Image (tube, helix red, strand yellow):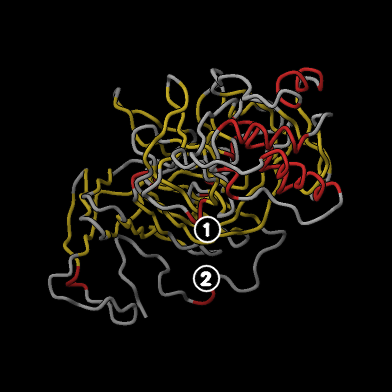
Amino acid sequence: MARDHGMIEPFEPGQVKSRNGERLVSFGTSSYGYDIRCSNEFKIFTNINSAIVDPKNFDANSFVDFRGDVCIIPPNSFALARTVEYFRIPRNILTICLGKCVTGDTRVLDADSGAYIPIAAWTSKRRTAALAPGGWQRASVSALAAHGVKPVWRLVTETGMALTATAQHPFLTPKGYVALSDLAVGDRLAAAGAVPFFGRERLGAPERLGRWVRDQALCGGAAEVPPAVFRAVRSDVARFVAAVLGEACEIQGPRALLEDVRHLAMRLGHASRMTGAATVVRLYAVPSADACRGALCVNGNTGPDGTGSIVWDRIAAITAAGTAPVYDIEVPGLHNFLANGLVVHNSTYARCGIIVNVTPFEPEWEGHVTLEFSNTSPLPAKIYANEGVAQVIFFEADEPCEVSYKDRGGKYQGQQGVTLPKT
């Protein structure tokens, strides 16, 4: 459709990652979307007149026009640009821009305190676990980026690990980082083998606490792993996990509880598998109960030293999960983090604190897309012209819409160049 009907001009049928030997922020066609480029025309916001940003009466004098291959956005400011591509959206197509993010309930490890925190509650003062050539390292987080409500997909592995993310969030595979939209059932993903980061707190009676949690889970009670367990020293975590799993090294109960127990066992270097329905699952040690009984359940020791940084798991299912608020954290240097036990990467711009905001392209809209780059960092930020900046995904309806953007005579129809807000 893009090639034959001029939906995207100019159109690149593949992914372009380099030019004349120089590495680029990639652009072009992916499995289900298109990575758009920004042109070399920019409007940089400057508040020299102490103006109020009013979408009904926007002052064009608040911008400085700039043309060049690299645009520098001041700290905590923003710039407008336009796409290189001119779009003509068919009457039965809706197009949206997706960032590379995960949902707010995704759990991330605080590598200093041992706390296991939803990403939506993260702060830049923490350090998390990031994969380096020599294994897992404590890595500083420079910022948390909230990217609004986006369509998301839920990925589940054969061992029962699960993560809900946008289509373009990259996962570590044997071939490198690959976007969720480019993955398929049966593909292998990197999961944590052992991440030996623990807290400094002591539990009063870890075995008794573990047995209580086990009893509540087996009786169908609203059991949860107390937050103090995640912040505990390694030996107390091992005793707690051993008591929860019991002599048989397995337990059945609510998924949220068993995901937490599995995470703690992973820190100790013990592999496990989850099976069952969405709400009640079975967690058991692998490769066998005998191996678990000798290493963990009876002795209650700390298990392996965790020299194996990752293990390869396979995708069992990828399903649409509606829409949800999504987030990303910035991990300078290593540019990856552990999310629900899976190794994921930041997007090229989001990991630097640069958020690209794009509105949906409605049916029968056409024009250059006006982009907004928000620099949320305290440092100047670079935007590269004629390279990839964001990805758009196309949704085809069963039938054409009754009233299109063209029918309504939309005020941004046919726009060219960087277009300011209109009323």
Relative to 316, does residue 310 appear above or below in the rendering?
above
What type is the residue that disc 2 sits on?
Tyr
Q: From the viewer's side, name the closer residue of 206 and 373.
A: 206
Report the residue at 21% width, 72% height from top: 60
| Residue 18 as seen in the image, left or right of residue 361 | left
| Residue 400 as seen in the image, left or right of residue 344 | right
State the image coordinates of residue 415 (x, y, percent, origin top left).
Answer: 36, 65
What type is the residue that disc 1 sits on?
Ile
In the rendered image, is residue 91 in sight? yes
Report the residue at 65% width, 24% height from top: 301
Residue lying farthest to the right in this orientation: 219
Query: In the structure shown, which secondary structural element does the residue marked by tag 1 occupy?
Result: loop
Mark 1 or mark 2: whose residue is earlier in sequence:
1
Relative to 18, does residue 323 appear above or below in the rendering?
below
Relative to 399, does residue 49 appear above or below in the rendering?
below
State the image coordinates of residue 224 (x, y, percent, origin top left).
Answer: 70, 51
In the rendered image, is residue 7 in sight? no
Name the residue beneath numbered marker 1: 89
Q: How many marks?
A: 2
Query: In the structure shown, which secondary structural element does the residue marked by tag 2 occupy?
Result: helix
Q: From the viewer's side, name the closer residue of 27 and 342.
A: 342
Q: Are marks 1 and 2 in contact (CB under 8 Å)?
A: yes
Q: Which mark is residue 231?
A: none
Report the residue at 54% width, 17% height from top: 307
Q: Callout 1: 10 Å neighbours few (<14), some, many (20+)? A: many
What is the CA distance from the residue labelled 1 to the residue labelled 2? 10 Å
Q: From the viewer's side, name the closer residue of 189 and 403.
A: 189
Name the residue beneath numbered marker 2: 405
State the image coordinates of residue 311 (x, y, percent, origin top left).
Answer: 61, 23
| Residue 74 as seen in the image, left or right of residue 210 | left
